[in-house]
């Protein structure tokens, strides 16, 4: 038998109190993780530095494998590429150009994550599970961060292809000076269009996959979600990085070709046309040349994304606790 569940207050002292329209009973922190813009930037910068420094040797192998012409690495095999680098320079060869990476990764990731968080807040419309908002926010983030990172990424790859005996550059700033003197400012952004065309779908897939996998993992065991945050972020990041890198490998090969023109015997292109570079790669190496370096690329991006997201979320948690402590101390009289 149906019953009326509406409470009936006989005592006139009990009166219902209407709540504001924007009232949410389950809200426990301030809007958008309770962090300031500068805190997103610092968290992103730390995450980017840790990620790229930890995975730099794998990135060096990938760069060698993707470069064509008479560069030292002829084989597309990871083992052969690694063996050739170690034979010519030893373990130090795996870290050539790491200074340029350090100068570029921190600022670029500060822009990357801060723009992503602000865009996600704007496009989500109050729905944290909106994959479209995550994807388009990732595109905005990469367009902004690539403008910061591309010049140093070009310097990094040119240094990676050299060695102590045959490198035309004596360090990061020598490379910057010579490239500027010989080719001008345009050389630093020769691959910017390709980089954006590659990273736009990369980040769209990456962020949408990360948010979806993270949400799925947390729904499996919601009662232990807080205790297993590190595992959740690392697993979601690895899945996102691996999938996104696999999809965009051909454009990454084109980007490497444009950034390494004329270095160590690599081809020079009369125009910066992506189509011309595609045709050159296919003519010299067949369609398999477009996926050259896919294995180390996935080996780089899967653990790199796991490291990056874990570090980023840990940094955000630190700032959230710091903000909470500051807020509590400010209320004590």
Image: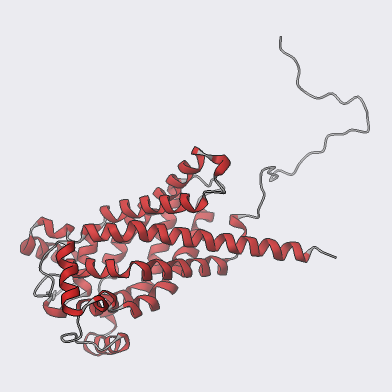
Taking depth in this image into account, of 140 and 75 the one nearest to the observer is 75
Residue 58's image quarter? bottom left
Tell me: residue 26, above or below residue 54: above
> Looking at this view, is 151 or 320 the one in front?
320
Residue 79 pos. (x, y %): 17, 63
* Residue 135 visible: no
Is residue 140 positioned above or below 214 on the image?
below
Q: Residue 19, image x and y in percent? A: 76, 41
Q: How many marks?
A: 0
Above-or-below relation of 174 to 122: below
What is the x, y in percent for residue 108? Answer: 42, 71
Q: Is any part of residue 68 visible from this angle?
A: yes
Residue 316, compared with residue 263, is above or below; it is: above
Say which of 299 and 24 sits in front.
299
**Left or right: 197, with 217 as reference point:** left
* Viewer-proximal residue among 230 and 259: 230
Pick the quarter of the image with the C terminus.
Answer: bottom right
- Image position of 87 (left or right of 220): left
Specify the farthest residue to the top: 1
Q: Residue at x 44, y 56 (%)?
A: 137
Q: Quadrant of the N terminus?
A: top right
Q: How is the image coloured?
A: secondary structure
**Residue at point 22% right, 68% down?**
61
x%, y% of residue 99?
Answer: 35, 80
Residue in view at x 11 percent, y 65 percent: 75
């Amino acid at each position: 038998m149906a019953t009326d569940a509406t409470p009936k207050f006989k005592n006139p002292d009990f009166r219902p109190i209407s709540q504001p329209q924007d009232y949410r009973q389950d809200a426990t922190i301030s809007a958008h993780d309770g962090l300031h813009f500068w805190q997103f930037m610092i968290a992103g910068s730390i995450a980017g530095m840790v990620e790229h420094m930890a995975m730099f040797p794998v990135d060096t192998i990938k760069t060698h494998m993707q470069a064509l012409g008479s560069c030292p690495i002829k084989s597309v095999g990871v083992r052969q590429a690694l063996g050739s680098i170690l034979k010519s320079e030893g373990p130090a060869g795996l870290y050539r150009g790491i200074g340029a990476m350090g100068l570029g990764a921190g600022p670029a990731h500060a822009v990357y994550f801060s723009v992503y968080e602000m865009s996600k807040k704007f496009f989500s419309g109050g729905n944290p599970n909106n994959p479209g908002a995550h994807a388009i926010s990732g595109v905005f983030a990469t367009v902004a961060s690539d403008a910061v990172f591309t010049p140093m990424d070009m310097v990094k790859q040119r240094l990676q292809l050299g060695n102590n005996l045959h490198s035309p550059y004596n360090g990061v700033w020598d490379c910057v000076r010579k490239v500027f003197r010989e080719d001008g400012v345009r050389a630093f952004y020769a691959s910017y269009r390709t980089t954006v065309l590659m990273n736009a779908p990369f980040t769209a897939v990456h962020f949408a996959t990360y948010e979806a996998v993270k949400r799925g993992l947390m729904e499996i065991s919601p009662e232990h979600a807080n205790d297993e945050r590190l595992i959740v972020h690392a697993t979601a990041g690895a899945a996102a990085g691996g999938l996104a890198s696999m999809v965009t490998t051909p454009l990454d090969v084109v980007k490497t070709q444009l950034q390494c023109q004329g270095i160590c015997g690599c081809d020079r292109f009369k125009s910066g046309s992506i189509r011309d570079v595609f045709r050159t790669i296919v003519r010299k190496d067949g369609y398999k040349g477009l996926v050259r370096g896919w294995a180390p690329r996935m080996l780089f991006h899967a653990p790199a994304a796991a490291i990056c997201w874990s570090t980023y979320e840990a940094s955000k948690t630190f700032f959230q606790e710091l903000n909470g402590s500051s807020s509590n101390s400010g209320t004590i009289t």
